[in-house]
């Protein structure tokens, strides 16, 4: 409590200094989000401390524990607002910047049920959300037909980050056929008799998470990049041998191969975050563990013994495929960047390992571990419609930016393709 008081005083002093009378440039900012117990004891009030009035706002309550708020303003800077400390009602807040302002996902503590009402403070520029305790039944009823705000949609028409040509690696020119990105192969891991990783307590299988996400990525590509062809290694719950997936991509003349998986660690419910892999020598224990797990399903295959990639093979691969690897790594880091900055997921970085599914593909290829199925929160996120949309849009955006980058260097020559 003393700490909050101290922080508040520091904030007030710095505000007072900042807002001197001579201050003519009104810097609009979300300074802080706080919540306090209501004086009538019926719940809480969440306060959004704004230094300037927002143009307008929109609030939705699509899930009992999720409130979404879109604040419209053309100059609002929410990047470093102070989140509530030891909040009794709020678990965490995630913000999503976009062209029209910014969005906030306010995740409430589980097991508490509130009706909510939003209004601007009459005495200043703050916005308030009043939470009033109610029953689970009523909240379920109130939220049942409320759609999520998909921040992704708000971001669709946002200008692309300007990447200067000098940043570009020459190796990007070595893309297959020099034709740019015309065919993208989406590989949903596992399927059929191979469930992949399992969260037994929640009854969640990896194969059931990665398929809808792969299909969503494909939908986004079909919608927003209609000149790109999407090929799936599987688009339903069927088993496909690891050794079959590469040839599907090769036969389809794929320009990019994206394999989608979810992670697990035995007896660990706290590990979380996304990882993006390219083929190469595993340089960490975790990468090695992930590789062994994903490769082990080959033993279920119908086409003979699993292939074991030796260190030597991988070393030779690295030497022989430096160009392809650089392109893969570039795509991987763009995906990783989307996960951490846009999807607000913890990113565990780009890693290398000897994934059999990526072996000997004649195209840049990455393997994504979306998150940990053994972490209950992440497992629920990955199975929710909302989480799946966020993850799929992050992958889509990376692919779109990757293609844009490529075509800044050399216009795509799709017309000459057979
Ligand atoms: Zn997997």
Image (cartoon, rainbow, N blue to C red):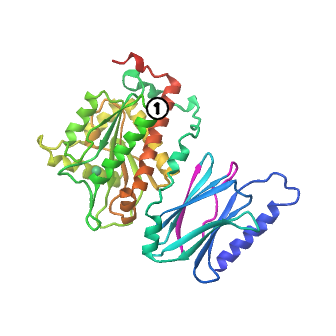
Q: Position of residue 76 (x, y in %)?
A: 68, 53
- Secondary-structure class at tag 1: helix
Please tell me whether residue 87 belongs to the stretch shown in magenta: yes
Q: Position of residue 414 (x, y in %)?
A: 41, 21
Q: Position of residue 100 (x, y in %)?
A: 63, 47
Q: Quadrant of the C terminus?
A: top left
Q: Give left or right: position of 129 versus 150.
A: right
Q: Position of residue 360 (x, y in %)?
A: 27, 33
Please tell me whether residue 10 belongs to the stretch shown in magenta: no
Of 184 and 176, nearer the camera is 184
Q: Residue at x 65, y 82 (%)?
A: 39
Query: What is the magenta segment's predominant secondary structure?
Result: loop
Q: Residue at x 64, y 58 (%)?
A: 80
Of 386 and 255, nearer the camera is 386
Of 322 and 264, nearer the camera is 264
Q: Which residue is mark 1?
A: 403
Is 132 situated above or below 400? below
Magenta span = 73-97
Residue 41 visible in rendering: yes
Q: Give left or right: position of 69 versus 328.
A: right
Is 48 situated above or below 345? below
């Amino acid at each position: 409590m003393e700490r909050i008081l101290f922080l508040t005083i520091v904030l007030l002093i710095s505000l007072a200094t900042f807002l001197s009378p001579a201050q003519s440039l009104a810097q609009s900012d979300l300074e802080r989000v706080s919540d306090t117990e209501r004086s009538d004891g019926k719940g809480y009030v969440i306060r959004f401390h704004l230094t300037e009035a927002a143009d307008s706002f929109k609030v939705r309550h699509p899930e009992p524990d999720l409130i979404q708020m879109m604040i419209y303003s053309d100059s609002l800077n929410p990047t470093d607002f102070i989140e509530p400390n030891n909040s009794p009602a709020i678990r965490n807040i995630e913000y999503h910047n976009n062209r029209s302002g910014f969005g906030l996902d306010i995740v409430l503590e589980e097991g508490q049920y509130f009706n909510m009402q939003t209004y601007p403070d009459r005495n200043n520029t703050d916005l308030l959300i009043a939470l009033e305790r109610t029953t689970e039944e009523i909240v379920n009823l109130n939220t049942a037909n409320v759609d999520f705000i998909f921040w992704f949609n708000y971001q669709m028409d946002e200008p692309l980050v300007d990447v200067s040509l000098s940043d570009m690696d020459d190796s990007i020119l070595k893309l297959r056929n020099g034709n740019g990105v015309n065919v993208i192969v989406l590989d949903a891991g596992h399927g059929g008799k191979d469930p992949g990783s399992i969260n037994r307590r929640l009854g969640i299988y990896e194969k059931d998470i990665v398929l809808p996400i792969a299909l969503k990525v494909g939908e986004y590509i079909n919608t927003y990049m209609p000149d790109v062809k999407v090929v799936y290694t599987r688009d339903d719950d069927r088993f496909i041998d690891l050794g079959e997936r590469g040839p599907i991509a090769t036969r389809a003349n794929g320009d990019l191969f994206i394999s989608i998986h979810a992670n697990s660690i035995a007896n660990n419910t706290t590990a979380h975050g996304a990882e993006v892999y390219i083929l190469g020598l595993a340089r960490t224990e975790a990468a090695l563990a992930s590789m062994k797990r994903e490769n082990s399903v080959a033993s279920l295959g119908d086409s003979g013994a699993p292939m074991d990639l030796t260190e030597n093979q991988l070393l030779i691969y690295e030497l022989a495929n430096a160009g392809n690897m650089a392109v893969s790594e570039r795509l991987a880091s763009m995906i990783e960047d989307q996960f951490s900055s846009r999807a607000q997921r913890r990113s565990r970085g780009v890693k290398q390992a000897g994934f059999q599914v990526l072996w000997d593909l004649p195209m840049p290829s990455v393997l994504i571990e979306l998150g940990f199925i053994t972490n209950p929160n992440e497992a629920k996120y990955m199975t929710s419609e909302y989480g799946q949309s966020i993850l799929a849009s992050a992958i889509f955006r990376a692919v779109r930016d990757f293609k844009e980058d490529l075509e800044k260097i050399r216009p795509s020559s799709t017309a000459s393709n057979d």
